[in-house]
Image: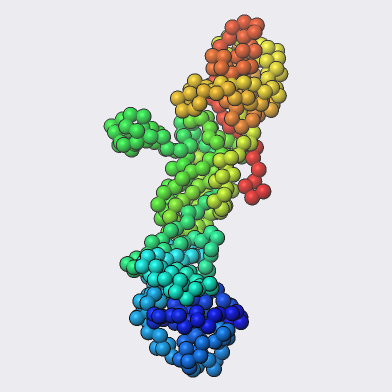
Amino acid sequence: MESEKVRENDISLLEHRLCLNCLGRLFGKMGHGLTNRERGRSISVFQKRGIIPKELPVMDSEISGGGSEEDVAEVDCFICQGLMLEIPSFAELAITEMDKYEYDNFQVGVKVDPEISQREEQIWGEINATHQELIKAELNREIGKLVQKKTKKEVEFSKPQLVTIIDTSFDHVDLQVSPIFIYGRYRKFQRGIPQTKWPCRKCRGAGCESCGQTGKQYEETVEELISERVLELTGGDRAKFHGMGREDIDARMLGNGRPFVLEISKPIKRNLDLAELEEEINRTRQGKIAISGLEWVPRDKVKWIKAATFPKTYCAKVKFSKRVSPDELKIACSKLDGVTLDQRTPQRVSHRRADLVRRRKIIHIRIDEWDEEEGLWALISIKGESGLYIKELLHSDEGRTTPSLKGLLAENSPVEVSIEYLDVTEVCDESPTD
């Protein structure tokens, strides 16, 4: 250890017998390269010789060979009362629980009887300790070193996959298992499938005759179609689906797909072949959904997904209550192109969203196809800012969206506008690794 000053009466003031670990821990923050046990042995050697050194000596082979670990009784230690002898058994307890999981790194934490901590603090006060280390810190470190040696896994302090909490009073181990996060994109080919689970409207998820005791309003969801197999493979506790927004239940999600992050809590296995997983889900869910671009991502990608406000492109088949000429439709669309409009919260979502007026921009709008024979329908492509209500932009929602396609067409003569179907054709996002 480094030559740091220790007052002569520091050790001489000790009135209690301490084990080597607890003795050395009184000077645990002095110097580097030694364990507390080695520090304690060095001090005990000099005590045995009747010498209280002015400087804590560097432990060398001569000094270490001159003392005996029995100089300070282990079980009779005033502070730990033999707890430090149990470090190997605590390590084994931890390994037994950790072996139930697949992991690459870990961290160890301990709970210590409050009375031990109180006795430790009492000793600090008696000798005016200034370089002491907490018993919890030593236990964490020494148990962690043994677990690392036996499992060949790495200790990780910032983002461990497993955190092992050992209650030293009851020889009990709790594990905190970090979730895994899988990024990807999904396309939805079948209408009537919501993104996430909706509780049954009648029983609110409890299960009733109306929902077939499932508690669900809809039989299938995008979340379940993707997560069910992932949960089977990982043995996880539950899945949570984080999508970059969501499309209406009756809308398809096409094009490049909608980004999502699937969070699996408490996975038993965490090393999956994502290419095989992707192929299997696409094969077994054919005609309903398809996923692509699966990759492992850190937790903060959930925040990225939720905060994203990227533009989206839609294709809508619009129907008119009477003939609309090509010129009328072109003029109306040209008046909407590039416009920032006001949208009051739509009636269809007013039960779950605040009644506000939002300003959203139409980046581009164009006519893709036209009913040349009767002029009763058209395919219209719209690219708009995130949060733009497309259906309301087209049919006006009884004037709650202004301007609207219906409102502009009705300037010549009254006409009703309805949406036969709506598809999302592109989510204009950036890569999550950018």
Residue 149 seen from this side: no
User: How far across and down, in percent of the image, does residue 302 sit?
Assistant: 55, 46
Mark yes or no: residue 51 visible.
yes
Q: Answer with the quarter of the image where residue 339 lies.
A: top right
Measured as percent of width and height from the top left, residue 168 is found at: 37, 68
Tell me the residue at 51%/87% (across/down): 52
Please state if 320 lies on the left or on the right of 280 as rendered: right
Q: Nearer the viewer, residue 420 or 394?
A: 394
Residue 200 occupies quadrant = top left
Residue 166, x across and y down, in percent: 39, 66
What colour scheme does the image use?
rainbow
Quadrant containing the N terminus in the rendered view: bottom right
Work out whether 218 lies above or below 31. above
> Is 407 drawn above or below residue 268 in the view shown?
above
In the displayed image of the protein, which residue is found farthest to the left? 209
Picture coordinates of residue 284, whole percent (x, y):
46, 46
- Nearest to the observer: residue 126 or residue 87: 126
Q: Is residue 78 above or below residue 378?
A: below
In the rendered image, the vertical position of residue 152 relative to residue 185, given as above or below = below
Task: Tally the marks.
Answer: 0
List the single residue furthest toward the top.
Answer: 413
Name the residue rendered at 56%, 53% in the picture: 298
Instruction: Write the residue at 33% across / 38% down.
Output: 214
**Residue at left 44%, top 43%?**
224
Between residue 368 and residue 98, name the one nearer to us. Answer: 98
